[in-house]
């Protein structure tokens, strides 16, 4: 049974009638053969894996078709419709391409479906690249294949991590499942850290190249030219994406120019051993984890791993210096480049801490990493910087003894210690560990330092003082930072600090001065031309505006959230949504406030920012029932964040009052599940809509095209992969103004009574473990700009959290499953909302329209008369 390939199977079945030659391509073990057999079950199959010579391809095809010779095949198939699967073409590619061309030309009714690790590259060929399985489908395959062997595995974090480490490759997953009668997923993971041969079939069956993962990779590796094999091996030291220039520096042969290295890269991409994507006008390359492990093993066999890693570190130091320079100059692609390479920057910094005699390469790598702490990896950056301090300067700044070799590595001259301490301080601040941040910032200012450490450490102390209530000191430090940034030529930090100074002035009650400061910061940001800094300044402008003109602030914050999304600034987008939710909450429109608060929670969870998650939980607590409110407030703690501090200080503290002392203690994922449940309930309450309404709206078109849906609104069409929520929307949109019972949408035919707990304790633990795993997977995918993997993980995360939240009542108590109607209401509600979130991500105007016009519950309805006036938010 084919698992997890419904969309690809539908696409391939749609391609076959329209094209006479289709080639499914992909890395070895990705499931090309299984997909081809499922798409064309009645086809003749020519298996080329055992064909060693090009001259044998045509006879093998004839035997598969039931003829004595290829010429007889051309005559016998000249009339009538026939399908042929030409399987595993890569090692005899030219011969396979030749027979396919001749067969299609001579036999008008013949259709050829080929599988290969690279295209046949012939006229009229349609190519379907096959990607690895996404997270949920990969786990489902592992569980199904283990079950075939009599083993019932839980869908837990170990299973998810095993599938992630195996890159979602079906062959690798099936090989792992074959080991489950004797090894748990966690044990298989442990063995994988050392070698790939654990993924070998316990019995010697099947094609040789499919008996182990290593054999599968070796099948492709052995057919590479020798020079390209060596390049491939050295590329294994990259942990994330890399450019052709970086590949040349790390993996190129002596004397090879860039074009020669690009030739190696193109060949590897063509043979599915390297991935490539275009971004900001340039190509970025990457390896699957399994291929990376194989390449590193080849380097180790030749005793060449350390040399390759040293070249890699040197290249990344150059990249770090270049990225940081471009960030200071506000180069348009600098931020995206930083987030693309940050995985490798962290790994290279770790190697420097472990192996370098001095700190200078590590410090060069840490400087740009300081700017990534608000988008996920703050803890990693903090721990790296602190390890560097301990390695070269001593944990207290006075003992520089290296514990490894006993030598004195104290480096007092120069700014290395100060820069490292400043990076650690800024990362601890992002984690809301104020005491640690202040101590590290003070250390940075005590050691010899330059402008980088002086600005970053003082900027850290501004927030420490603000959050701790030392407002006069915060203002003084902000002024110091502004003076320093002017002297050092750091306009980006100057604008960011000027906006922060707005918060300090507002906290001091100097609102007129705060408005002047916010306006100046906005003007400077616009002149500098940095979209994220413009958004940062506008956020503070709108927060100040909310204190005097909430209606105007609502419109401004709604538009700002959209601009932050366009600028690729998730921290600002989440803060704008939270500020909008705050304005609506204080205005008494709790139903309207629930959606932006839920969006803020989603965004902060996705970028892995626990401080912002906890502040958003406090706002969600305002909308919650009394028992859950206390639980959420306790889970959030006393966390504050300057992003929306103006509104938090003015409104949130009075609304929540004193922190509860007797509320139940829950984990952060449990608190998020409770908050989302309460926000969903608040959204269903009968309160006035925030946006004005009018009669009539633009027509929404929704059409199913095989495995995708085409949705058209306001002259724009987008396409999304099939999901039950989109089918529900199709039903509602084709019956405007009519109520549809949730059981009809769910397909339930017979009512049933109460069925006990919605989720038992074991199931809840599995859900919670998977949620934590998905958060890590999503953060990693977004760091690598792997949008397909990120979308898959994000959607699964949304649905799991929604389902877990639906299983809990007030105060975190387990809900009991109602009858059919109640279960249908719950299922249909969360899947429709998940579908609308997916629509909103690619077509915000349609997303706004659907949020305003689609009502869910026991009865669901699409009411186009409630569409928001164009230009307003739903």
Image: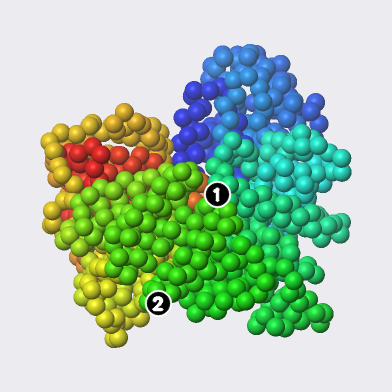
User: Badge 1, how many Cα within 10 Å: few under 14, some, many 20+?
Assistant: many
**Horizontal and vertical percent position of residue 764:** 38, 70
- The residue at the point 68 percent across, 77 percent down is 390
**Could one spot residue 253 in this view of the protein?**
yes
Q: Are circles 2 and 1 on residues that touch, CB within 8 Å?
A: no
- In the rendering, which numbered label is found on residue 335? 1
Q: State which mark lies toward you, 2 or 1.
A: 2
Of residues 466 and 760, which is closer to you in this image? Answer: 466
Between disc 2 and disc 1, whose residue precedes? Answer: 1
Q: CA distance from mark 2 to mark 1?
A: 33 Å
**Horizontal and vertical percent position of residue 596:** 29, 55
Query: Colour scheme used in the picture?
Result: rainbow
**Could one spot residue 288 in this view of the protein?**
no
How many numbered tags mark residues here? Answer: 2
Of residues 564 and 213, which is closer to you in this image? Answer: 564
Residue 871 vs residue 328: left or right? left
The residue pinned by badge 2 equals 470
Residue 599 vs residue 105: left or right? left
Residue 146 vs residue 669: left or right? right
Q: Which of the 4 image quadrants contains residue 677? A: bottom left
**Horizontal and vertical percent position of residue 295:** 75, 53
Q: Residue furthest bottom?
A: 662
- In the rendering, which numbered label is found on residue 396? none
- The residue at the point 50 percent across, 66 percent down is 480
- The residue at the point 35 percent across, 81 percent down is 665
- The residue at the point 52 percent across, 52 percent down is 491
Q: Secondary structure at mark 1?
A: helix
Of residues 455 and 839, which is closer to you in this image? Answer: 455
Of residues 695 and 730, which is closer to you in this image? Answer: 695
User: Badge 2, how many Cα within 10 Å: few under 14, some, many 20+?
Assistant: some
């Amino acid at each position: 049974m084919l698992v997890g390939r419904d969309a690809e199977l539908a696409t391939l079945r749609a391609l076959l009638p329209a094209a006479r030659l289709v080639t499914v391509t992909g890395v070895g073990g990705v499931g090309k053969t299984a997909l081809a057999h499922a798409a064309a079950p009645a086809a003749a199959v020519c298996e080329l894996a055992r064909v060693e010579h090009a001259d044998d391809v045509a006879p093998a095809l004839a035997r598969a078709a039931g003829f004595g010779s290829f010429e007889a095949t051309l005559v016998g198939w000249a009339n009538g419709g026939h399908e042929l699967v030409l399987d595993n073409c890569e090692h005899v590619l030219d011969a396979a391409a030749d027979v396919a061309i001749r067969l299609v030309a001579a036999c008008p009714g013949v259709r050829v479906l080929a599988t290969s690790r690279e295209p046949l590259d012939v006229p009229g060929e349609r190519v379907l690249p096959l990607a690895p399985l996404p997270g949920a489908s990969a786990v489902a395959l592992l569980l199904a294949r283990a079950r075939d062997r009599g083993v019932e595995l839980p869908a837990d974090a170990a299973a998810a991590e095993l599938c992630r480490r195996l890159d979602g490759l079906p062959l690798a997953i099936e090989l792992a499942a074959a080991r489950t009668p004797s090894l748990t997923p966690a044990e298989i993971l442990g063995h994988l850290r050392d070698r790939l041969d654990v993924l070998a079939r316990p019995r010697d069956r099947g094609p040789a190249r499919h008996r182990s993962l290593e054999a599968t990779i070796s099948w492709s590796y052995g057919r590479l030219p020798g020079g390209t094999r060596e390049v491939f091996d050295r590329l294994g030291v990259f942990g994330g994406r890399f450019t052709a220039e970086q590949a040349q520096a790390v993996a190129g042969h002596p004397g090879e120019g860039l074009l020669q290295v690009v030739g190696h890269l193109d060949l590897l991409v063509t043979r599915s051993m390297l991935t490539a994507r275009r971004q900001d006008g340039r190509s970025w390359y990457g390896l699957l984890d399994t291929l990376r492990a194989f390449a590193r093993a080849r380097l180790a066999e030749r005793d060449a791993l350390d040399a390759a890693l040293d070249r890699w570190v040197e290249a990344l130091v150059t990249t770090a210096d270049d990225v940081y320079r471009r960030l200071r100059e506000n180069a348009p692609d600098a931020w995206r480049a930083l987030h693309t390479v940050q995985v490798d920057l962290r790994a290279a910094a770790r190697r420097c801490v472990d192996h370098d005699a001095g700190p200078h390469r590590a410090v060069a790598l840490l400087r740009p990493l300081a700017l990534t702490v608000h988008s996920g990896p703050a803890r990693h950056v903090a721990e790296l910087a602190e390890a560097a301090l301990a390695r070269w300067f001593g944990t207290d700044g006075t003992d520089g003894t290296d514990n490894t070799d006993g030598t004195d590595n104290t480096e007092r001259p120069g700014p290395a210690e100060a820069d490292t301490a400043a990076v650690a301080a800024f990362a601890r601040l992002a984690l809301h560990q104020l005491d640690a941040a202040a101590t590290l910032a003070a250390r940075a200012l005590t050691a010899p330092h330059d402008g980088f450490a002086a600005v970053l450490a003082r900027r850290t102390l501004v927030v420490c003082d603000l959050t701790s209530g030392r407002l006069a000191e915060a203002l003084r430090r902000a002024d110091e930072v502004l003076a320093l940034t002017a002297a050092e030529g750091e306009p980006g930090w100057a604008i960011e600090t000027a906006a922060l100074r707005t918060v300090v002035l507002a906290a001091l009650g100097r609102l007129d001065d705060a408005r002047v400061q916010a306006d100046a910061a906005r003007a400077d940001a616009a002149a500098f031309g940095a979209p994220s800094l413009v958004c940062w300044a506008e956020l503070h402008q709108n927060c100040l505006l909310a204190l005097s003109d909430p209606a105007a602030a609502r419109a401004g914050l709604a538009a700002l959230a959209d601009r932050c999304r366009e600028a690729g600034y998730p921290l600002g987008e989440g803060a704008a949504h939270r500020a909008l939710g705050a304005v609506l909450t204080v205005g008494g429109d709790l139903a309207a406030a629930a959606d932006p608060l839920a969006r803020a929670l989603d965004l902060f969870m996705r970028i892995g920012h626990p401080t912002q998650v906890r502040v958003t939980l406090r706002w969600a607590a305002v909308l919650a029932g009394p028992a859950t409110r206390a639980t959420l407030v306790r889970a959030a703690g006393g966390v504050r964040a300057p992003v929306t501090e103006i509104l938090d200080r003015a409104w949130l503290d009075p609304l929540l009052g004193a922190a509860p002392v007797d509320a139940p203690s829950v984990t952060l994922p449990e608190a998020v599940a409770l908050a989302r449940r309460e926000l969903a309930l608040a959204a269903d309450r009968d309160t006035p809509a925030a946006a004005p309404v009018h009669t009539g709206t633009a027509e929404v078109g929704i059409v199913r095209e095989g495995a995708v849906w085409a949705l058209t609104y306001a002259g724009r069409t987008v396409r999304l992969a099939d999901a039950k929520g989109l089918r529900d929307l199709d039903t509602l949109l084709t019956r405007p103004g009519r109520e549809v019972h949730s059981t009809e949408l769910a397909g339930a035919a017979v009512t049933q009574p109460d069925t006990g707990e919605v989720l038992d304790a074991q199931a809840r633990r599995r859900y919670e473990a998977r949620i934590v795993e998905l958060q890590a997977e999503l953060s990693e995918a977004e760091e690598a700009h792997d949008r397909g993997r990120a979308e898959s993980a994000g959607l699964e995360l949304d649905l799991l959290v929604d389902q877990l939240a639906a299983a809990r009542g007030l105060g975190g108590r387990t809900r009991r499953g109602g009858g059919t109607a109640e279960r249908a209401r719950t299922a249909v509600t969360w899947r429709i909302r998940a579908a609308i979130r997916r629509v909103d991500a690619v077509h915000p105007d349609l997303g706004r329209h659907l949020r305003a016009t689609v009502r869910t519950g026991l009865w669901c309805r699409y009411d186009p008369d409630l569409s928001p006036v164009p230009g307003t938010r739903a």
